[in-house]
Image: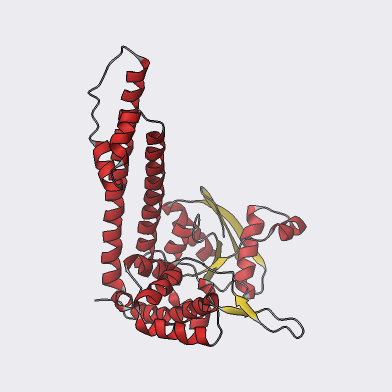
């Protein structure tokens, strides 16, 4: 299936690769039902391949999974392949079906209907709120730089929390139309008041989302919170990385590669060494865990001192500690998601 915002194109192949039919359906609930009905008229459907199962094809994938159809995620063809073979929606749908038939497509589509998807939504909302708050804070302080000296000196001695509270209380009670200086001062006070109010609203949203994430992790993955260096936010990131179907990760090594902390060979001739994998989801969760443990965990500190005496650099030690943390997290998350709470 080739998925788009408004319509999806489906192609059905026989077990030997012969094209049976191609059809387009609207990207609606009715369209999903019609698509499945059409395919079942042509034969028995057990597996389907779809492009964009995490975006345009997410809702369709969820529907097919609920109907007992195994959905596999298909990577979009690269530009070189499309230049050689052409590009059209029916061709893309056929290529997706052939990827499943040949075994090239093996990654199962995300179910998107459990706690991991909820965590994704909360993290998305929190991330945008944090960025917007940072932008508002920078704008407020930029306004203060060019503000009236008396107002600037009055607010300069305050810390951030006091500054935002004071600016939020700035009233427009100095309306005076006699001169430009008073008008500029009035506009400055109004701007500071609005920016401070925006910062307060965003802070409340962030606090609310942090509470929701904490309750979500406490319910679905409480084991993670017992580990040194893992808080609710870090635990949510790790759950999102592991995904809705952690069974697709056959070993801790595959999870380490997914997180970008697995060593890979980089040798040539007599020069034998390894470097850190630069692929995968290189988020800051494992780095945050390691840095916290280096500050507060005696066992990690002892390991660090021992490796330093062996001649290892801090960078090499941190890489090893990330790999150990990935191993620990992998077994904790697999155990948690294999035994859902009652």
Tell me where residue 227 appears, x and y as whole percent. Answer: 33, 78
Name the residue at 39% across, 80% down. 334
Does 315 sit above or below residue 74? below
Does 52 sit above or below residue 138? below
Tell me where residue 140 appears, x and y as whole percent. Answer: 37, 38
The one of 91 and 241 positioned closer to us in this rendering: 241
Residue positioned most to the top: 178
Image quadrant for the N terminus?
Answer: bottom right
The one of 184 and 10 positioned closer to us in this rendering: 184
The one of 175 and 144 positioned closer to us in this rendering: 144
Q: How is the image coloured?
A: secondary structure
- Number of numbered discs overlaid on the protein picture: 0
Name the residue at 68% across, 60% down. 78
Tell me where residue 320 appears, x and y as whole percent. Answer: 51, 81
In this picture, residue 136 sits left or right of residue 49 = left
The one of 260 and 184 positioned closer to us in this rendering: 184
Image quadrant for the C terminus?
Answer: bottom left
Does 277 sit above or below residue 129? below
In this picture, residue 227 sits left or right of residue 244 = left
The reply to whether residue 243 is in sight is no
Tell me where residue 326 appears, x and y as whole percent. Answer: 45, 78
The reply to whether residue 139 is in sight is yes
Residue 333 placement: quadrant? bottom left
Name the residue at 71% across, 81% down. 267
């Amino acid at each position: 299936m080739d998925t788009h915002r408004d319509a999806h194109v489906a192609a059905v192949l026989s077990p030997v690769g012969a094209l049976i039919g191609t059809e387009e359906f609207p990207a609606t609930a009715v369209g999903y039902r019609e698509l499945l009905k059409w395919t079942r008229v042509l034969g028995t459907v057990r597996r389907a391949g779809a492009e964009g199962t995490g975006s345009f094809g997410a809702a369709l994938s969820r529907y097919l999974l609920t109907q007992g159809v195994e959905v596999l995620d298909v990577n979009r063809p690269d530009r070189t392949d499309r230049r050689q073979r052409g590009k059209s929606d029916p061709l893309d749908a056929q290529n997706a079906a052939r990827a499943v038939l040949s075994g090239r497509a093996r990654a199962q589509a995300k179910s998107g209907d459990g706690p991991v998807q909820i965590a994704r939504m909360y993290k998305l909302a929190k991330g945008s709120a944090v960025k917007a708050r940072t932008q508002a804070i920078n704008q407020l302080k930029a306004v203060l730089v060019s503000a009236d000296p008396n107002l600037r000196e009055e607010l300069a001695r305050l810390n951030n929390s006091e500054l935002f509270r004071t600016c939020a209380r700035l009233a427009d009670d100095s309306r005076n139309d006699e001169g430009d200086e008073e008008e500029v001062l009035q506009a400055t006070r109004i701007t500071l008041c609005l920016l401070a109010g925006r910062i307060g609203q965003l802070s409340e949203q962030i606090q609310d989302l942090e509470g929701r994430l904490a309750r979500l992790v406490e319910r679905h993955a409480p084991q993670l919170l017992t580990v040194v260096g893992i808080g609710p936010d870090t635990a949510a990131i790790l759950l999102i990385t592991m995904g809705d179907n952690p069974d697709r990760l056959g070993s801790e090594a595959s999870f380490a590669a997914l997180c970008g902390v697995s060593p890979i060979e980089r040798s040539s001739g007599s020069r034998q060494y390894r470097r850190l994998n630069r692929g995968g989801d290189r988020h800051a969760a494992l780095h945050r865990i390691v840095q916290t443990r280096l500050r507060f965990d005696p066992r990690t500190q002892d390991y660090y001192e021992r490796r330093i005496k062996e001649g290892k650099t801090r960078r090499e030690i941190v890489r090893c500690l990330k790999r150990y943390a990935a191993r620990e997290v992998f077994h904790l998350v697999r155990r948690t998601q294999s035994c859902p709470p009652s």
